[in-house]
Every structure is written in structure tokens, then in C-alpha cells.
Amino acid sequence: MVVCENRDTAVAWMQFIQCAKGRCSVSAFNNWIAPIVVIEATPLEITLKVPNIFVKEYLLSNFKEELRAFLPVNGQGEPAINFVIDAGNREPKKQEVQQEQTLPAPVHTSLRGQVKLNPKYRFDSFIDGADNQFAKSAAVGVATRPGQSYNPLFIHGCVGLGKTHMLHSIGHYITDNNKKLRVQCITTEAFINDLVDSLKNKSIDQMKKFYRSDLDVLLVDDIQFLQNRLNFEEEFCNMFEALINQNKQIVVTSDKPPAQLKLSERMIGRMEWGLVAHIGVPDLETRVAILQHKANQKGFAVPQEMAFYIAEYVRDNVRQLEGVVNRLSAHCRLLNVEISQDLVAKTLMDMMQHTPHHQITVDQILKCVAAVFQVSVKDLKGPTRTKELAVPRQVAMYLACQLVDGTLKMLSESFGKTHSTILHASKAIEKRVTGDDILRRQIEIVKRNIQAAAA
Ligand code: ADP
Ligand code: MG
């Protein structure tokens, strides 16, 4: 049964379906999109039932931008979708297996964790501004003389500011200008998955060979996902050194500078070997130029005064800026209306509602931890030292250190504990999550709930 609690998100999903219909063939639509069922829709997220993991991958690989434009997005700017794999469908019938094999492969991913370069992410579609010029010059330098200028090039900046765009631009430039060079672009998550699979299938030597000698340029997106994954970090570091020693170009992106990553000193040192470049938040004029460029690409005209209005409102995430353009253009096209100030204001209101902007408090953390670990807030704050309470209490302190904007003094007052207890708890959990998958998942759920509560 379809239970839609929130009309807006449910309507947005229907609009997305209309948009998707126009973007793929009838058979692709029937095979991939039509079987998806909305289970729940709230202002913060949508829960979709999909018949198998391939449908989920297809949707995310081919329609990420459209999903971002139509649906609520989470704190990372990703579409806030909860996928439920239909248990009754886990064992596909023979006929279905055959059908799956003949369906088109997802556009952006392929073997060995490699990501296909997004054809839209090129240097000429990257708008320069004072805050990204240094990083862009470095990227162009590396792309023109791979392995001979800065190695590695480490690009860092907040989410949605164009790191992946720049990384893929480097890849395109190199492949366009030097066909002989083998360029691999990977996400850190995919590298880890690949490593896990290789260990399982006892094919680790093949993997090592692939990453160490079958490529000339390695582009690594989102290295922050290597944090707290000690075993993988070592393998990554070995591969990294092997490549650098052969003058193979490495480019890494991250949401933080090397020194702020929770990685080993060895790894941080390697990241700082070459050039570290920061991408900052673009200024107003650059944001307007980006917005107009994105609108132009879609053949959609945004009057200059409205472009300024939007760019003043959406300040620190280009992906969101693009989301506004996508949503406006889809709306105008589907309903056959002109862009207007009212429509812009309503779209901004709808989209920004989903962006967390309130500060997270210790009380919110305690409440969410208590709910997930099934204990009471009172007990969490109390003195009892049973095992059932010790771990969730430490988790609350660990999360407070990560998420709450405040001094250690303020945190220790909120918890009624000493500074060193808080630091010790935080370190203990940090260490423990590396080997405890259940705890890591529990913490992820708590974090998600905290973000939803603070939004
Ligand atoms: P990040 O990897 O830093 O989270 P992305 O590279 O995915 O960000 O960028 C998010 C979106 O914003 C992409 O669609 C990208 O094309 C766009 N974008 C970001 N910065 C720029 C820019 N300076 N010029 C053009 N597009 C940009
Ligand atoms: Mg990215």
C-alpha cells in the first residue's frame, strides 16, 4: 500500500516521474522506474520500495541531479531517499534474471570501483572565481603535465563546491589530450568495497596489480571516507606510495584539509607531499555566473534580478544553487508557465526548509542516542555505570565532540563530567567503531536522526 504522509514530497515524486519519462526510453522507464513504489513521504525524506539493488543503482547513477532537484536533500546535499529492497523479490525468477542482463548498464559506474567521468564536468563548464582560482590553476597544471608538477594534488572544500567537477575535468583533459595514459577515477567508498571483495574472493593480488601498475593517473574522490577504516588505510597508503614512486599522477579530493582528517600521520604526510589547494565558497557574482551557466545549459532563461535574488539566498552550496535551477526549470516546463518572482520565492522556501540550519545541542544528542540504544535520557545523564549505559553515554559524548559547536568546558558542564572523561569517551568510541559494524551503524542512525531533528 502507498502511504504518503506529506503531499508535497509525494507530488514532487510524481513530478520527478514525469521528468524521468521524458529522459529515457519507454523500455528503460518500464523496466527501471515503473516498478518503484513510494512507501512513505515526509518533508525530510522519501522511502521507496525497489525490487532489487540494480534498480536503486540505476536510479542513483542516472537521475541523481533530477532527484536532488525534486526531492528533499540531506545535510550532504544528496537526495534523502530511504531504499527498501522488496524482500519478496530478492530471488529473481529466471525470466527476470535474463531481463536484467539485457537492460542498459547504469551510466556512471563500472568495474573495479571505477567511476565513469561525468561528461558535464569539464574545465570549460567550471566557472572561475576568486575562491576557486588557485585550485583550478593547480588542476589545469596537473592535467597538462600529469606526474610532473604537483604530486599528489590534494583539493579540499565543503560539500557541493565543485571538487568532483574539478576531479573529473582533470580526467577528461588528460584522456582528451593523451590517449595513451590510463586514467582511473574512483570513489574512496568504491575502493574499500573493492578491497573487501578482493579479500573475500582471494583476488587481492589482482587488485594490487590493477591499482599499482595498470594505470597512469589515479583520481580519488572523497578521501574522508577512509577515516576510521584502519585496515583499508594501510592498503591505500601502500598503493599510494607505489604510484607516486613511479611518477604516476594522483589527485585526491576531501571535505577537509589533510591535517584535519582523522587518518594516520603517515597517511596525512603523504597527502601533504604535493600541493594542497582549497576551494572556497564562491562570492555573489560567481554564484550568479554559475547559476546562469547552469540555466543556459538547460536552455532555461533566468532574468538577472532573479538570479541575484537566488544567489543571495543560496550562499554556500553550488549543488543547491543548481538544484534551484533544476526545480524551477522542471516546474516551468511541466506546467508550461513563465518563471516569476513568486515561483522563485516558493521554490526557495520549499528547498531551504530541508536544509539543516539550527545548531545541534547536547540535549538533542542525548534524546536521539537514548532512542536508538533504548535507554532513558535520565539514565544517560545519571551516575550508573552498567555496561548497558556506558557505551551509549560514551557515544553521546563522542557525537557531542563532533557535532556541537562549543567549547570542551561547555560540553563538560552539559554532561556533568570532567573534560578528560569526555575526551576519553570520545577517543574510546572512535577506536571502537573501526572494528564494530553494529555500533557504527547505530551511530549513523543517531546522526541521521539528530540532523532531521535539527533541520
Ligand atoms: P563536491 O564534489 O565539492 O561536493 P560537485 O563537484 O559535485 O561538488 O559540485 C556540485 C555541483 O555544483 C555540480 O553539478 C557542479 O557542476 C556544480 N559546480 C560547483 N562549482 C562549480 C563552478 N565553479 N562552476 C560550475 N559548476 C560548479
Ligand atoms: Mg563530490
Image (spheres, grey):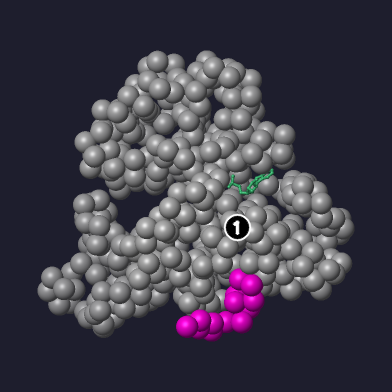
- Residue positioned 34% across, 69% down in the render: 87
Whether residue 392 appears in this view of the structure is: yes
Picture coordinates of residue 28, whole percent (x, y): 58, 56
- Answer with the quarter of the image where residue 316 lies: bottom right
Quadrant of residue 114 within the rendered picture: top left
At horizontal 77% and vertical 51% (from top left) the residue drawn is 298
Residue that extends furthest to the front in the rendered view of this protein: 95
Q: Nearer the viewer, residue 301 or 56?
A: 56
Horizontal side of residue 193 vs 41, given as left or right: left
Whether residue 414 appears in this view of the structure is no
Percent position of residue 418, x then y: 24, 65
In this picture, which residue range is highlighted in magenta?
1-14
Estimate how packed mark 1 is, as few (under 14), some (14 to 19) or many (20 or more) residues with alpha carbons within 10 Å. Answer: few
Q: Residue at x 59, y 18 (%)?
A: 178
Q: Amino acid at mark 1?
A: Ser
Count of marks overlaid on the render: 1
Q: Residue at x 37, y 58 (%)?
A: 94
Q: Residue furthest left?
A: 386
Residue 70 appears at what percent x and percent y? 64, 66
Q: Nearer the viewer, residue 160 or 134?
A: 160
Magenta stretch holds residue 270: no
Please give the residue where the numbered disc 1 appears in the rendered image: 27
State yes or no: Cβ of the residue under disc 1 lies below 8 Å from any atom of ligand 1.
Answer: no
Q: Is residue 9 magenta?
A: yes
Percent of width and height locating residue 412: 31, 67
Q: Secondary structure at mark 1?
A: helix
